[in-house]
Image (cartoon, grey):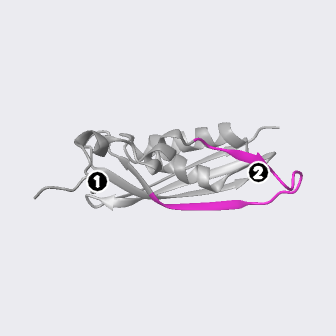
Amino acid sequence: MTQSPTQEQSSPAENLEMKYGERNIAEGQLITFPNPRIGRRYNISITLPEFTCKCPFSGYPDFASIYINYVPNERVVELKAIKLYINSYRDRYISHEESVNQILDDFVAACDPLEVTIKGDFSPRGNVHTVVEVHHQKSN
């Protein structure tokens, strides 16, 4: 069967090009905006139930829900930015412990909260369920 000139045909090279979502994820960084209530202590809770990364030993995928609870200081993290940032882990070979600690380090560097707790609740694999929780509190 031959295609007419009006029908599109993709080449193998075109199929290897990054899709727009992949570009957004690759370019993603934690973006913040000014806290609208500086001086008022309040808590922000974010749940990211579709976290994925790869086991650095086996290459098998790991799945988790990431919970971020923080008290903002001068900056608040933008939600779409945190989504894209979290999605950037999907092809990384990283342990449960390192991924949660890296998320904490990047989060603190981006928005310098008064305090933050990040919890990674990993789906069981091989009959093992892991929860990693880290906390940071700003020193005065």
Residue 109 in which image quadrant: top right
Is 64 left, or right, of 127 in this rendering? right
Q: Is label 2 in a helix, a strand or a loop? A: loop
Q: Position of residue 140 (x, y in %)?
A: 83, 37
Front position among marks 1 and 2: 1
Which stretch did the figure color magenta?
29-50
Does the rendering let one see residue 114?
A: no
Residue 79 in which image quadrant: bottom right
Q: Position of residue 33 (x, y in %)?
A: 76, 48
Amino acid carrying label 2: it is Pro
Does the rendering let one see residue 29?
A: yes
Q: Position of residue 27 (x, y in %)?
A: 53, 39
Which residue is under mark 1? 8
> What residue is at 71 percent from the left and 60 percent from the top?
44
Say few, some or many: other residues with alpha carbon within 10 Å of mark 2 (under 14 / 14 to 19 / 20 or more).
many
Residue nearest the observer in this picture, 99 or 85: 85
Is 95 left, or right, of 80 in this rendering? left
> What residue is at 67 percent from the left and 50 percent from the top?
116
Amino acid carrying label 1: it is Glu
